[in-house]
Amino acid sequence: MINVAIIGAGAIAGVQAEAFRSFPKLCQVCAVCDLYVEKARELIKNKNLSQAKAYKTMEEAIRAEGIDLVSVCLPPSAHAKTAIEAMEAGCHVLVEKPMANSLEECDQMLAASKRSGKLLSVVCQNRFKTPMQRIHQMLRDGVGGRVLHAVVNSLWWRGENYYDLWWRGTWDSECGGSFTSHSVHHIDLLLWMLGMPDTVTAVMKNVGHPNSELEDVGMAILEYPNAFAHIGTSIVDYGEAQEIVFQTEKGRLSIPWSPAAAAPLPNGFPKRDEAREKELDSVYHSIPELALEGHPAQIKNLLLAIEGKEPLLTDGTEGRKTIELIMAIYKSSALRQTVTLPIQEDDDFYRKETMVQKMPHFFEKTKSIENFASTEITLGRDMGK
C-alpha cells in the first residue's frame, strides 16, 4: 500500500484526492497538509478521506505517516522547493502544473530525482484522454502524412477577481500569466505530438485583468524545419472554445475531432474529398477508447510505476519541455525578438531572478486576499468530447 500526502488544500487538491481515492488497493491518502490547517480538515471531510489526518507542514506528515508519495498542489513558486525536499526525504513526487517557475528549478528537481532514485511525475492529465491518444497515435503512425501547419487555441475566461488571491498575479509568485497558468497543458500536448520547434516569435498583453502584472492574452508563432504552428492564449474568451488542429498532407486531424480533406480542381481550388475524410474517420474511431482517463489514469500509471509494474509515462523531463517553450515565448515577447531553442544555462531566461527582471508589468497588483470563500473551480469545455 502506497501512503500518500497531498500538500496544499486548494481547489486542485480536491481533484487529486478524488483520483487517489479511486485506487483503494494501491494507495491511501494518509495526510493533507496546508498552512491553513482548517482547509486541510475541510478537504479531508468533503472528500471522505477517512484514513487522512490534517497537518500544517509536509515534514510533520512524512515523520508521522511514513509517506511514500507526495502530491504537490501548491502555488507554482513552491513547487521546486517542496518537490526537492520530498524526494530528499525518500518520497516519490507528483507535481501539479506548471512544473516550476524556471528551467533552473526544473533541472534542480530532475537532479534531486536522479540523486534520490525517486520518481518525479508532472501532471499532464490531458495526455490520458481518448481524443488526445487517438490523434497522437495517428500522427506517430503518419496517417495524414507530414504535418504542415498546427494551431492551438487555448481559450479561457476568468473574472477580474481571479487575481485577488495572494499568490496570483505577479511574476515573482506565479512566474507567468495565461501561457503558464492556463495554456500549459495545451502546450504540453503540442510538444508531445509535434516536438520542440527551432524558433519562437511571440507577443502578449494584459487587456482585462488590472490586478495582475501578467499577460492575459498572447500569440506565439513556432517554426519547425518543415512545419509552422501558432499558439493562442486567452483568459478573456467567453465560451472557452479550445482546439488543437493539425493540417497534414492528407487532411485535417483535430481535437475536437472534425476531419476534413480536399482534392485540387484543375485550377487549384479545393473539392471536398469525402473518401479521404471517411478513411481518416475510420482510423480515428478504430483506436480504442481508454478505460480510464484524466487525473485518475495518470495517477494509476504513477502508482504502478512506483510498484515497478509500468514505465512512468509523464516524468520530469517531459514537464521541463513545456517550461522551456514558455520561457522562450516570454523571452521573445519581452525582448521583441525571435528566440532560438534550446535555452542555455547562461541565458537570463534560464533563471527566475533574471527572467523576472526582464518582464513587463502590464499592471501592478494592488488587491490581495488570503483565501476565496469558495474553492469551486470550473474547467471549461472538456476539449475533445
Image (tube, rainbow, N blue to C red):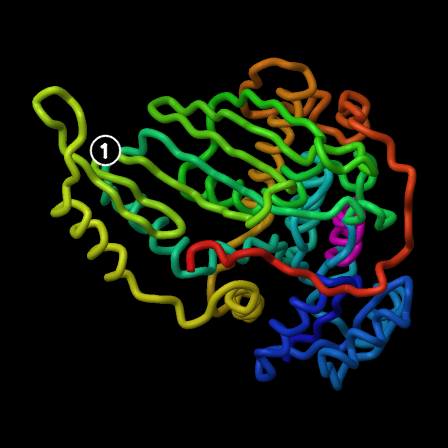
Local packing at callout 1 (Cα closer than 10 Å; few below 14, some 14-19, many 20+) is some
Q: Is residue 170 visible?
A: no
Q: Is residue 146 visible?
A: yes
Q: Which residue appears at 70% of the width and 31% of the height?
A: 207
Image quarter where the N terminus lies is bottom right
Circle 1 sits in a helix, a strand or a loop, which is it? loop
| Residue bearing mark 1 | 249
Q: Residue 218 appears at what percent x and percent y?
A: 61, 30
Q: Is residue 78 magenta?
A: yes
Considering depth in this image, is 235 or 319 the residue closer to the camera?
235
Considering depth in this image, is 254 or 311 the residue closer to the camera?
254
Considering depth in this image, is 274 or 84 the residue closer to the camera?
274
Q: Main secondary structure of the magenta part?
A: helix
352 vs 155: above or below: above
288 vs 350: above or below: below
Q: Residue 256 appears at what percent x and percent y?
A: 39, 51
**Corner quadrant of residue 111:** top right
Q: Residue 313 appears at what percent x and percent y?
A: 49, 56
Q: Is residue 365 magenta?
A: no
Which stretch did the figure color magenta?
A: 76-87
**Corner quadrant of residue 181:** top right
The amino acid on which the numbered mark 1 sits, given as a three-letter code, is Glu
Q: Which residue appears at 47% of the width and 32% of the height?
A: 196
Q: Residue 114 appears at what percent x and percent y?
A: 64, 49
